[in-house]
Amino acid sequence: MSERPLAGRTVALCVAGGIAAYKAVVVARLLVQAGARVLPLMTASGARFVGKITLSGVCGEGVVDDMWDPKFAGEAHVAIADRADAVAIVPCTADLLARLAQGRADDLVAALALVARTPLILAPAMHPRMWAHPATRRNVAIVAADGRATLVGPVHGEVANGDVGFGRMSEPEAIFAAIVEAIGAIGVQAIGVEAIGRGADLAGKHVVVSAGPTVEDLDPVRFLGNRSTGKMGFAVAAAAAARGARVTLVTGPVSLPTPAGVERVDVRGALEMGAALDRALGDQLADADALVMAAAVSDWRPRERSPHKTKKGAEGTLTLELVKNPDLLAGVGARRGERARPVLVGFAVETDDLLGYARRKRAEKKVDLVVGNLAAHGFGGDDDEVVIVGDGTERPLRASKRAIADAILDEIAARLA
């Protein structure tokens, strides 16, 4: 990384009211060390959490908190917007998200966000129950669909009162990296940053995504399952919603939070997942524009499910009779026939000959794309190494699952266009 990758750049750093505001001081320090000029702004609530003298001392600039600050010849928010290469709101509270979604300009920070033409980086931070509230989810979906802002976080972790969940603000290094990425400085890799610049290219489209494992119950206690965590499918669902799509996410048992703006359907077994997908896709597959089949659907299920817990028995062995589950994606591919919609995307998790299996699966299942990855790379992590196999195209990609999700959606958007 270049020692001063932001030399000559200006960042407007807006501090809103929340316990996480103290991290904004660290973000300011990182930006200054990278060579940026940092213009500090505060909401009235933000000034209750971080002292103006502290922020001003780190930035070397006076804190602006008044729309009518006399040192600006005209309107302060317009003047700052004209000077800034990026605007970052750290933390971005639930209230501020709501005001941004409504396009309000009732304080300096909201007005700046509305008038700025440069990248807008938001670092949400709030109690997990506030982040999960339907109103917040709607506001996040609106802000994301507008295509103006990059959301960094929130992340899962402990918040101020000791509760644990999604709502904790991302760490300063991740926010700093997002700002650098948004500005386009060379030599810095953003950490956990959503792709920007695509806007709402899937607005008006219905994208159906399957995710996670399916589990096949042997009895009320035991089941057959697999190691899928659902992270890839959830990343696709979140990215599609951020790009304006209506998203139905059909997921097996996972502990991941529902992405903002996504309709979630929870299932257990393959047959239940198949029924949920049929409802989402509609008669003649007419209700969806794309299906991304990221779920790891069990190939087998027990012929009979015991209503009682199966005991070990004296022999110490157990024989299970299994029957094959239907191939859900192949079934949709056969029903679609020669039609172009919905666009169909499958996944191939393999242990060897990845490219060969991915090519064969694409042909056999009659789908548009197959995303292949090795089992050793994909399960559980936030990054992956895949190859996206299309009609005569093979694109290797090593990136975060969110970046891979956007690459998949790029392909879908191109086909829908």
Image: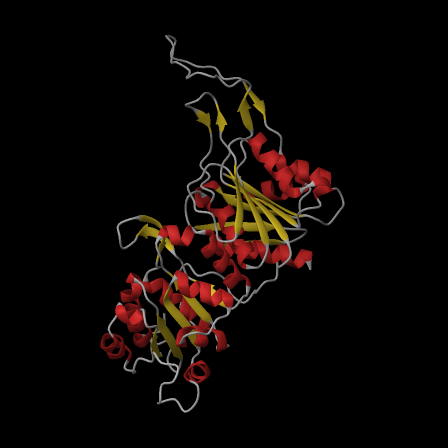
Nearer the observer, 115 or 374: 115
* Quadrant of the rendering where the N terminus is positioned: bottom left
> Which image quadrant for residue 80?
bottom left
Residue 183 appears in the rendering: yes
* Quadrant of the rendering where the C terminus is positioned: bottom right
Q: Is residue 165 left or right of residue 212?
A: left
Q: Is residue 312 above or below residue 176?
A: above
Q: Is residue 144 above or below residue 346?
A: below
- The x, y position of residue 327, in whole percent, is 62, 33
- The x, y position of residue 278, in whole percent, is 64, 38
- The x, y position of residue 399, in whole percent, is 47, 56
> Number of labelled discs?
0
| Residue pictured at 31% horizontal, 73% vertical | 28
| Residue pictured at 23% horizontal, 78% vertical | 53
Q: How is the image coloured?
A: secondary structure
> Which image quadrant for residue 154?
bottom left
Question: Hey, which residue is sitting farthest top in the picture?
Answer: 314
Question: Hey, which residue is sitting farthest front in the picture?
Answer: 106
- The x, y position of residue 411, in whole percent, is 62, 56
| Residue pictured at 47% horizontal, 21% vertical | 218
Question: Hey, which residue is sitting farthest bottom in the picture?
Answer: 73
Q: Is residue 42 left or right of residue 134?
A: left
